[in-house]
Image (cartoon, grey):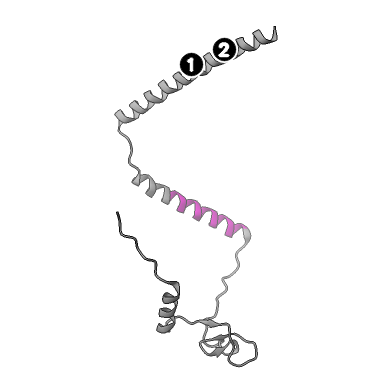
Amino acid sequence: MGRLLKKKDCSKQKKKKEDNGSEPTLETTTEDGGGKPVLNGVTSSGLKGILPKKTVPVAKTATEKGEKNFIGKSIQFLREVKVELKKVTWPSRKQTIGSTVVVIVVVMIISLFLGVVDMGLSALVKVVLQ
């Protein structure tokens, strides 16, 4: 029997992150009492110089953007398909022929069974209706 692994407590992981101080945390409480959120002791009004500015890309026309996006996604999809096909373990010729024969035999058996049942039920219905 395998050994059961204990999950780490989420609160312990959060405490470790807070102790490191590497990531800024947004506190819901306010220090200035004005109702503004505080980030590591700095109010939102003082964050303008600290936080990086978001850059806005130059707008492209809808057709350019859609075509390039579609073509790029299609090319990426085909690349991923190629990679996945390399991972496939293909059956040998002997295995393929064997599987094909099994499928054909099973289909024939099932079709014969259904044919016999159909003829029997149709004969039963004819007897009941007469």
> Residue at (67%, 10%) from the top-left corner?
128
Tell me where residue 98 appears, x and y as whole percent. Answer: 33, 26
- In the shown orientation, is residue 34 left or right of residue 82? right
Observer-nearest residue: 63 or 70?
A: 70
Which three-letter amino acid code belongs to the residue tagged 1? Leu
Q: Residue furthest right?
A: 130
- Is label 1 in a helix, a strand or a loop? helix
Badge 2 crowding class, 10 Å Cα cut-off, few under 14, some 14 to 19, many 20 or more, is: few
Q: Is residue 81 left or right of residue 120?
A: left
Q: Residue at x 42, y 75 (%)?
A: 13
From the image, tell me which residue sits under label 1. Answer: 112
What secondary structure characterizes most of the magenta part? helix
Residue 76: within the magenta? yes
Which stretch appears magenta? 63-79
Q: Position of residue 30 (x, y in %)?
A: 59, 88
Q: Is residue 102 above or below residue 47?
A: above
Q: Nearer the viewer, residue 8 or 26?
A: 8
Looking at the image, how many numbered discs can be counted on the residues? 2
**Residue 11: mark in rendering:** none
Disc 2 to disc 1, how far (Cα)? 12 Å
Q: Which residue is mark 2?
A: 120
Q: Quadrant of the N terminus?
A: bottom left
Which corner quadrant of the image does residue 60 belong to?
Answer: bottom right
Residue located farthest toward the top when viewing the structure as drawn? 130
In the rendered image, the vertical position of residue 66 relative to residue 119, given as above or below = below
How dense is the environment of label 1, judged by Cα within 10 Å: few (below 14), some, or many (20 and up)? few
